[in-house]
Image: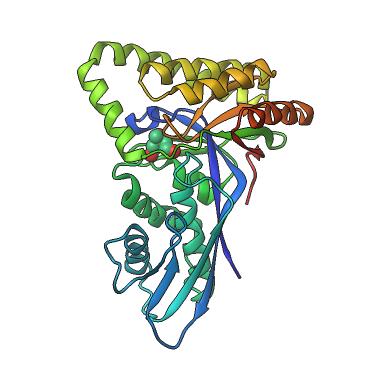
Amino acid sequence: MPGIGYGKAILFGEHFVVYGMPGIAASIELNTTCTYEKKVSGGITANDLVTGETINYGEDKAKKLGQVIQVILRETGIKEKNFRLKLSTNMSLMGGMGSSAALGVSILSCLNKEFSLGIDDKRINEITFEVEKVFHSSPSGIDNTVSTFGGMLWFKKGAANTVEQLQIPEPVRIVLIDTGIINDTAELIAKVRKQKEENPKEFEKIFASYSELALKAKNEVEKADWKKVGSLMNKNQELLRRIGVSSSQLEKIIEASLESGALGAKLTGAGVGGNAIALTPEKELQEKVSKKCSALGFKTFKVTAGIKP
Ligand code: MEV
């Protein structure tokens, strides 16, 4: 039985969530799967989705995937020494879709079933947060939370995180549009932190605007008023520009999406590279935005946001 880890799109609040402000993120159909194969010898092996190489855990502990396996073995107490993990994905990697969290959830769900570990979603989420640290050093926890629980989530980091399922009538159609440029989340978090230290007054204002916007967004998402949600996403994008995480490629995609009628468009994830999200509740609109961005040479994903695994 494969383990599945779902990807995510952030509708509101990337970067702001790192500073304890609330965000809204939704799970999407794109995912990573992990299957288990017992071996008689040869140690623990797995295929790295980013590099394509097969890593041997015993020899490659320093590599990211080796570190992920180390965290998972440590946290689950699995003693088995010989097995192969077969990983596959249809997500953009290092592209703002939460691929590292999906990786953690897929491996953990797979091993949970294989070894009858009996760990619940709460624990899967906690361990995947440790996996996230391997990749992003100081993650907020939003990606692992949405990959574990799915749905449309209101998330706020804290001594205990606030996680609330927002009830929407049905998952909403979106288009994710890939700049084709990979992003380094840890680096971008550090960049924003530096900017904040250099411009404390400006950031205070931006943070206050965002906090106000997030509360409005929650209200409109709960009403499924996608027109208003879209307009707030555009405002969120303005704030993301001001904290320095947009880029010419993202702006080109956003402009094209809005011109095609998307109700809102912004970057999703850490920014600069990665993906943009366009809000397109109607099927024809989703098609139109996707076509327009494909014609500009970008890879697009027509998905729904807020699926329950
Ligand atoms: C990454 O998907 C979103 C960031 O806010 C980082 C995080 O919350 O861990 C940039």
Q: Is residue 202 above or below residue 34?
A: above
Q: Is residue 155 above or below residue 259?
A: below
Most extreme residue toward the left, as rendered? 198
Question: Residue at left 52%, top 73%?
Answer: 36
Q: Quadrant location of ligand 1?
A: top left
Quarter assignment of residue 289: top right
Q: Nearer the viewer, residue 256 or 277?
A: 256
Residue 181 in picture, x, y percent from top left? 45, 37
Residue 30 in picture, x, y percent from top left? 60, 48
Quarter assignment of residue 302: top right
Question: Residue at left 69%, top 33%?
Answer: 173
Q: Nearer the viewer, residue 57 or 116?
A: 57
Question: Residue at left 38%, top 83%?
Answer: 42
Q: Nearer the viewer, residue 7 or 147?
A: 7
In the rendered image, which quarter contains the N terminus? bottom right
Q: In this image, 3 relative to 74: left or right?
A: right
Question: Residue at left 32%, top 67%?
Answer: 74
Q: Nearer the viewer, residue 96 or 197?
A: 96
The structure's colour scheme is: rainbow
Q: In this image, 241 relative to 27: left or right?
A: left
Q: Is residue 26 above or below residue 32?
A: above
Residue 79 in picture, x, y percent from top left? 36, 79
